[in-house]
Image (spheres, rainbow, N blue to C red):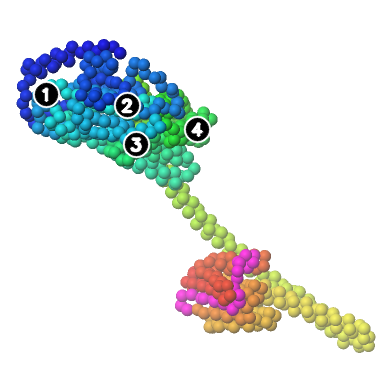
Amino acid sequence: MDNIRHPSFYKYFVCFVLFATPSKGTSFDSIDLSKLDVYFHEGFSPDWVTLIPLNNTSWQRIPGDPEGRRSLSIRNLKLENKPKHTFLSLNPSPAESFTFIFPILMDSSQSFTTKGVGLGLVGIAYNWQIYFNGHLLDDQIFGIKDGKLIDPKRKKRYFISIPNQYLKFGLNQLTIHIVGSRDFMGTGLYYSNPYIISSMSELNNQPLPIHQYGLVWIYLGAGLFWLYMFLKLPTQYNYLYFTGWAFTIAGYNLSRIDFLTPLKNWGLFSFRFEYICIFLSSLFFIGFIQTLIYKRLSKPAIILMIYYGFSAILSAFSPISFINDLLRLWQMTILIPMGLLVYQIGYAVKDEISKMKPGELSFAFFYQSMMGSLLLGAILLFFFLGLDIVSSLFYFNFNHLNIIGFLFFTATITLVAFSDFIQHHIKTKSRQEKLEVEVIRRTKSIQSLAKELIRTQENERAQLSRELHDEIGQALTVINLSLQHLAQNTELSSSKKIMNQIRACQSTVKEAANTIHQFAFNLHPSILDDLGLVPAMKSHAKSFSDRSRLQINIDASHLEIDHNEARISLYRIFQESLTNTAKHSDADTINISIQSNESEIQLTIQDNGKGVQSLEKINDQNSGLGIIGMRERIEGLGGSFSFESIPGEGVLITAKLPLQELSN
């Protein structure tokens, strides 16, 4: 190593001896360690805690930085004979010791202060011991096993008290013994600043990084908002990708919260968690842009997303040095997809602008439209992110300017998306209202058509019933009379054979007349028009009971229904219920009640059968009205219809018609 000369140091020391007089004070001027020279040596010896190696050539001097920005990460130090780091190696170098010695000059006000003094470290890892003037201040060394630290630690915003009796007027020595792998980015004092000796009150009064907590909640809130929008519009996959992006950015900020590092193993895990979130945020960001612009993922985008997803998986299990290299690779290559995305966004914006009329383009386009705000937000995001990457790669400074870009991008996109969502909701609600009006209109039209069809059907039935009764019935009567006249003919009566044929024909004609009469009655019983509903029901019940052997009990008060459609509908329900009971219910008794009061007419039909297991058979329109047909008839007249079936207990049908509706 070079022979170290330090004439300025002696000059300062002489000034102290000649002009400084010890005096006690209540103030303490802070000392910025990043501006002081530091001496470095590989390994550690207990003798070094009291050594100030000003002219020791075996120690390497690392000059201070006038601006106070100097990282003492072992991996990034330019050391002589330093072993070359193998990029993306899964076998990091074993943990070993490294020593930093800070010679510190203190004047009388500092060395004889009555205030509590402490050492403030912005970041330190992974095992360490800290000495001041040979006195041990902090011991976080837990041993090495198989070349690895048994219990690696990482601290941020770490304050250590220095007892006042350890302070000396003049030259003091701060010794920091670091243990860790030289391949790990965090081994040593890995941040650039601040590393200071100051009063404990000043250290404790440093502004808390409240923004770290705030950013976590901001991005969590944004993620929940986008997740809500996706659940409302599940076809918008860009909402889902932005949800993932917001959550991973929230996770990234969570990993950087200083006060979580004292938690057990959080310091080491937060490294992995931070890198996982970085890679996944890249994956989700590409997916968001692609699905927003093209509604699908392009092949280059899929390749990049697979790469970032695989990097996130490796970050969870690989050695710290390997994921440090992955991050460096990400920093060096992120400009490629960034440039591609900006080009794609710009091209999409160009297409939108080309569709505008002359004079329509204004600056409002860049904060009111999705594409315009996307372009503006992406440019600012990539600009600030690029500045941070350059600063990190070449100066190991972390300005965190990307916070501004991320916030601006998230805010603009979320606000525009929220506006679009509200507009979409308003349009959807308007369409729904129009659809509801149209559904109501068409429902009324269908109900009117159904009523007209029923009316037409009943008229046709009545006409067909009359024709069967009047025309064909009368023709059969004439035939029967003619046959009877032939039978009375004396000439024919002498022939026994002819008389037998005439009687057979008369019997056939009589059976045909009865069948036609029954058909005519079923189609439209004339008694329904002549005598009313109750007599028609009793007449049909008697004939049906004779044929089916069912006991049919009718409890009916005297009522007159002038409304023809109501009278026919109630009769058809009664008629169809008897048929369904005989076919499906295995009942032997049917109780029927038809009553009226001032407001409504109620028809109740109940059997004692086995009930109905499935409505499919009785809903079959080919076999009659079915339950659907019954319901349509009653509801078409403004009434209500219910069908209850309890297996093993029978069926209960209730139809109600309001008298007010029938009178309109």
Circle 4 is placed at which residue position? 306
Query: Magenta span covers which residues?
Result: 597-620
Where's residue 262, x and y in %? Answer: 29, 38
Q: Residue at x 41, y 22 (%)?
A: 85
Where disc 4 sits, the SS reads helix
Q: Quadrant of residue 272?
A: top left
Secondary element under disc 1, as helix, strand or loop, is: loop
Residue on which the image places disc 1: 169
**Residue 616 forms part of the magenta stretch:** yes
Sequence-earlier tag: 2 or 1: 2
Q: Residue 615 placed where, x, y %?
A: 60, 66
Image disc number at residue 151: 3
Q: Which residue is located at x 28 percent, y 16 percent?
A: 58
Question: Which numbered tag is attached to residue 113?
Answer: none
Residue 186's spot in the image, x, y percent?
Answer: 34, 29
**Where in the figure is residue 466, as x and y percent of width and height?**
69, 73
**Mark whose residue sits in front, 4 or 3:** 3
